[in-house]
Amino acid sequence: MILRIVLDTNVLLSGLMLPDSTPGRIVIAWRKRNFDLVVSEPMLEEITRVLAYPKIRKRLSWDDEHISRYIALLQFEAEVVSIAGIDAAVPADPNDNHLLATLIASKADWLITGDSDFDELCGQYPIIAPNEFVRRFL
């Protein structure tokens, strides 16, 4: 059975910018279909917003059209789930509630994040750091 994964935006963006890094290995593994990626509309909105940051655009050398094509790729190749009605709280950072809601709504196998705001939730939910995911699964 193939794993279903939610990737924190930071992991996805780090992987795009640094393909030889641990997050890069995870993004490459997804592109090779080693696991299924799960996203939600709020995640797609966040990814679109972050890709438009001048520093990120410069690092990736992506223009508006390239960003739009990448978001379309995510919408096409990832499983997009609705998080409507999902009650999820990340006490350390409510701005990350949509990530936890995506994990809960999708019943994905893992949320991969290096964000310490999720540390207190690791006992309740399947949350794993990028380096641990690579060590265990790639």
Image (cartoon, helix red, strand yellow):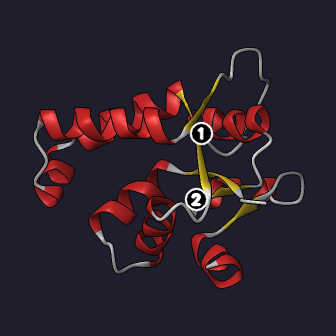
The answer to whether one can see residue 52 in this image is: no
Mark seen at residue 96: 1
Q: Is residue 137 left or right of residue 27?
A: right
CB within 8 Å, label 1 to label 2: yes
Q: Is residue 10 left or right of residue 40?
A: left
Mark seen at residue 79: none
x 47%, y 77%: residue: 22
Viewer-proximal residue, 40 or 90? Answer: 40
Q: How far is the residue under mark 1 from the one under mark 2?
A: 10 Å
The amino acid at mark 1 is Asp
Q: Quadrant of the N terminus?
A: bottom right
Which of the two discs, 1 and 2, labels the residue nearer the N terminus?
1
The quadrant in which residue 12 appears is bottom left
The answer to whether one can see residue 80 in this image is: yes
Q: Which residue is mark 2?
A: 115
Percent coordinates x, y for residue 136 in the rendering: 71, 81
Q: Is residue 113 left or right of residue 15?
A: right
